[in-house]
Image (cartoon, grey):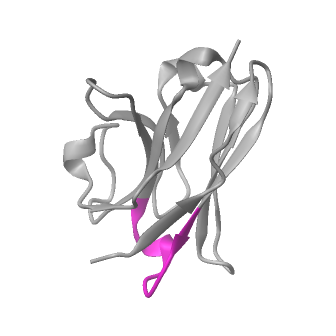
Amino acid sequence: QVPLVESGGDSVQSGASLRLACTVSGHSVRKYLTGWFRQVPGNDREGVATITSDGTDNYEDSVKGRFTISRDIAKNTLSLQMNSLKPEDTAMYYCAASSFGTAPLKASFFGHWGQGTQVTVSS
């Protein structure tokens, strides 16, 4: 098991920015495919962005150019910088890790999950 703890969720106005962080305990964040997913009640968990162990990133189309995924190897954390937030970005955001080297933006490929952090964007 890879313990993951998210933080940084908040309620903001449309157009604002937020930075989510995910602390990885006991395992190097560099060793895993890691990513961010989001979910609203009644919907499936949706992939937002992933980053491979060698640093290659991938984004869901609706967040390209607005969100940036990154890692801080020294602090063993994963981050998601979210700019130009829209009401449709409102969701519970989850940090995830996978033992796969690379994978599509699908929750089924990720076996380790945090508890989530809520992001609410009002118009």
Q: Is residue 67 above or below residue 117?
A: above
| Quarter that holds the C terminus | top right
Residue at figure coordinates x 61%, y 25% from the top left: 64
Q: Give the percent coordinates (x, y) of residue 24.
A: 49, 74
Tell which residue pokes out farthest to the right in this image: 16
Question: Where's residue 72, x and y in %?
Answer: 67, 69
| Residue 11 within the segment the image draws in magenta | no
- Would you identify the image quadrant in which residue 111 lies? bottom left
Q: Closer to the camera, 40 or 96?
A: 40
At 51% across and 62% down in the image, what residue appears?
A: 54
Q: Is residue 91 above or below residue 103?
A: above
Instruction: Give the camera-side residue of 42 and 113.
Output: 42
The magenta stretch is: 22-33
For image coordinates 32% across by 59% down, the residue present is 101
Task: Name the image quarter holding residue 2.
Answer: bottom left
Q: Residue furthest bottom?
A: 26
* Left/right of residue 113 with respect to residue 25 in the rendered view: left
Residue toward you, 21 or 10: 10
| For residue 103, side relative to residue 69 (left or right) | left
Give the residue drawn at x 27%, y 43%. 107
Count all numbered tags in the image, as a single digit. Answer: 0
Which residue lies most toward the left here?
A: 108
Figure quadrant of residue 100: bottom left
Residue 109 % position (x, y): 22, 49
Place of residue 19 in the rendered image (x, y in percent of width and height, measured from the top left): 71, 48
Q: Looking at the rendering, in which quadrant would you find the N terminus? A: bottom left
